[in-house]
């Protein structure tokens, strides 16, 4: 087997530490062809759809990829910006903000970049770029606060598969989740607090997380438990009574049972129970995207108002908010500290050894 070489490598090249943030990905354009290409890569991942390939691939290529791209392209068109996909532009801004925050303590020794699990920029291309810049220690931070086999697990698989092809594998720290990190919790709580200072409160605060099949929970995936803990910690920081908030799950797909309660069904039921106003936040999404801007802020707004609700407000994701960047930097710094401690210990050991040798 031939391993991937680093054509730009020089033995005298200064070694650097890299920080790679990743997200799910997005089509390059809000057009049927581009969406089909994105969905093909996304839905072909066995981590995303755990149906046996012999059963799933005919369904994917024979039905889904012939029907869904046009509908999804129309949905993407509703949220597309002058800079392109909201998910992509927010991730770019997050990387830039994180680079600036980390540079304050590390200068040019830190290389910050971003990649997408599906689509562009690809993980493979960015990992190659980081290696060419002399990165031999790498912190990977998937921007999924809550671990799921279908998101965080898939990202790990892709990175591990890439490293299996490389001659030189960097020292790696992979962050599996940060659902209860104090600064992440504070950043989300502050965003709710600031929104309510401008718009007032609502009868009910809905914490909507992306759903996953119920069987994942039954088989040991920690996602559901981590989402509930995030809600509890944020509600505690805000001083919310239990009757003033609820946790729900959105974006289900297929006929199997997913995590309950479902966001759309809940929003359709709340007006019938006397809830006239709601505010919805999606703490599991680090950046606004199709699932938040179109599914929640548009589709689910219509569900709530059609059912008799009077006021629906969507609280944006953290995106590149200063508090979010501070939280991400703190999460990364905790991993970098371990390396610094080891380097400091090694330097101290070397100094002691030299001193001992000088006394002989």
Image (cartoon, rainbow, N blue to C red):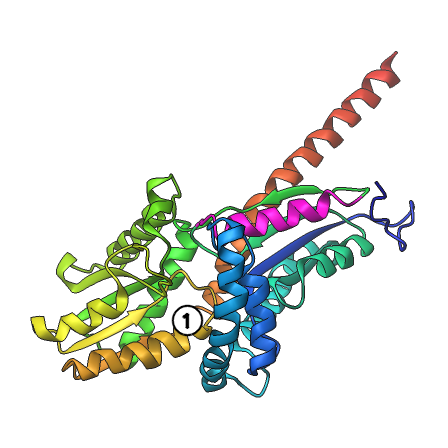
**Can residue 320 be seen?**
no
The residue lying at 16 percent from left, 64 percent from top is: 244
Secondary-structure class at tag 1: helix
Which region shows up in magenta? 147-166
Which sits in the foreground, 295 or 354?
295
**Magenta stretch prevailing secondary structure:** helix
Q: Is residue 285 above or below residue 93?
A: above
> Based on the displayed image, in which of its 4 quarters is residue 3 positioned?
top right
Q: Pointer 1: what residue?
A: 291
**Can residue 134 be seen?**
yes
Position in image of residue 146 (x %, y %): 42, 52
Q: How many marks?
A: 1
Look at the image and say whether residue 157 sits in the magenta stretch.
yes
Look at the image and say whether residue 13 sits in the magenta stretch.
no
Q: Is residue 140 above or below residue 77?
A: above
Q: Is residue 157 above or below residue 253?
A: above
The residue lying at 67 percent from left, 63 percent from top is: 122
The residue lying at 24 percent from left, 79 percent from top is: 303
Q: Quadrant of the C terminus?
A: top right
Which sits in the foreground, 102 or 261?
261
């Amino acid at each position: 087997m031939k391993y991937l070489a680093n054509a730009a490598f020089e033995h005298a090249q200064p070694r650097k530490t890299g920080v790679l943030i990743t997200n799910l990905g997005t089509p390059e354009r809000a057009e049927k062809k581009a969406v089909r290409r994105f969905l093909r890569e996304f839905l072909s991942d066995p981590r995303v759809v755990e149906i046996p390939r012999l059963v799933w691939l005919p369904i994917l290529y024979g039905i889904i990829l012939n029907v869904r791209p046009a509908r999804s392209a129309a949905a993407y068109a509703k949220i597309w910006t002058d800079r392109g996909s909201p998910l992509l532009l927010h991730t770019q801004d997050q990387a830039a903000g994180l680079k600036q925050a980390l540079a304050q303590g590390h200068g040019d020794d830190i290389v910050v970049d971003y990649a997408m699990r599906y689509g562009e920029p690809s993980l493979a291309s960015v990992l190659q770029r980081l290696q060419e810049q002399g990165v031999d220690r790498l912190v990977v931070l998937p921007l999924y606060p809550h671990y799921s086999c279908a998101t965080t697990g898939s990202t790990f698989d892709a990175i591990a598969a890439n490293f299996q092809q490389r001659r030189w594998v960097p020292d790696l720290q992979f962050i599996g989740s940060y659902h209860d990190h104090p600064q992440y919790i504070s950043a989300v709580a502050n965003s709710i607090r600031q929104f309510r200072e401008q718009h007032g409160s609502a009868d009910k605060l809905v914490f909507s997380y992306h759903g996953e099949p119920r069987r994942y929970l039954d088989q040991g995936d920690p996602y559901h438990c981590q989402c509930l803990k995030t809600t509890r910690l944020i509600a505690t920081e805000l001083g919310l009574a239990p009757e003033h908030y609820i946790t729900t799950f959105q974006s289900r797909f297929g006929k199997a049972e997913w995590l309950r309660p479902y966001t759309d069904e809940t929003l359709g039921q709340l007006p019938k129970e006397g809830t006239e106003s709601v505010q919805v936040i999606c703490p599991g999404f680090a950046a606004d995207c199709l699932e938040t801007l179109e599914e929640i802020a548009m589709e689910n707004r219509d569900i709530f108002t059609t059912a008799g609700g009077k006021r629906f407000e969507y609280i944006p994701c953290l995106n590149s908010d200063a508090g979010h960047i501070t939280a991400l930097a703190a999460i990364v710094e905790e991993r970098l500290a371990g390396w610094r401690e080891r380097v400091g210990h090694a330097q101290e050991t070397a100094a002691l050894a030299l001193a001992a040798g000088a006394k002989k």
